[in-house]
Amino acid sequence: MKVKTSKILVLLAIVLSSSVYGQKFDISGSKKGSKVFYKDGTSEYGKLKFDDKSLSIKYDDKSKKAIDINKVDKFEVYKKKDTIVYTYILSQRNYKKKKKQKYLAVIAWDYENVKVYNEPTTAARVGAFAIGQAVYFIQKKDAPYAEKLLKPYVNIHKRLREYFSNCPSLVKKIGTDFKFKDYKSLTPILEYYNNNCI
């Protein structure tokens, strides 16, 4: 009886994981169309197909082209009710290992001087236990890589103070005026940094 129950739970976890991944993170492309913004300031519209390591575009005339992800600033995928903005980032982990392989990320906050990303493949990789969770990365303007914002069992206020140590006035406010409760509470921290710490 215990063996059957555990098999059912494992199967349920796999099904739930796939379901959450498919609903929350659609990285197969967009039938409604998309727009790619390049680092040189140009852009183009078409239907995109993309994954962690590649990006391609299909035009109205049915022609296709592979896109070098290193030349992409960001791209927008149009859904029925909203627009999801993606980019490719280099994480601190890869940067330290001197790897130049970027990977797909959703732009969660997009300020001029600081950006926050979340990883769209989290739920698929870690299974049903990742329901409602996401891995977040933060990157200051001109920083060579995005740094993981939260690690288990780490004091988030301490981590944020260390990351924004180049702005003493913000450091004083983190944990007092600006308290981290959830990811929405990052907004005043990011806005303060963007407006006062450039």
Image (spheres, rainbow, N blue to C red):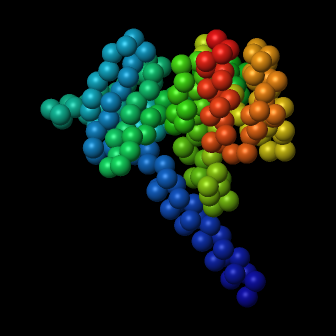
Q: Is residue 45 left or right of residue 163?
A: left
Q: Is residue 145 left or right of residue 163?
A: left
Task: Examine the rendering and report whether any part of residue 13 can be seen.
Answer: yes
Q: Residue at (59%, 39%) from the top-left corner?
A: 118
Say if 98 sits above or below 56 in the image: above
Q: Residue at (34%, 41%) from the top-left corner?
A: 78
**190 vs 128, nearest the viewer:** 190
The number of numbered discs placed on residues in the rendered structure image is 0
**Where, quadrant-wise, is the C terminus in this rendering?**
top right
Where on the picture, by quarter, is residue 94?
top right
Q: Is residue 24 left or right of residue 156?
A: left
Say if 154 sits above or below 129 in the image: above
Q: Residue at (43%, 15%) from the top-left corner?
A: 39
Q: Residue at (58%, 34%) from the top-left corner?
A: 117
Image coordinates for residue 54, horizontal then vertical, percent? 44, 32
Image coordinates for residue 42, horizontal then vertical, percent? 33, 15
Q: Residue furthest left?
A: 61
**Where, quadrant-wise, is the N terminus in this rendering?**
bottom right
Image coordinates for residue 62, horizontal then vertical, percent? 18, 35
Task: Examine the rendering and report whether any part of residue 138 can be seen.
Answer: no
Image coordinates for residue 98, horizontal then vertical, percent? 68, 19
Q: Residue furthest bottom?
A: 1
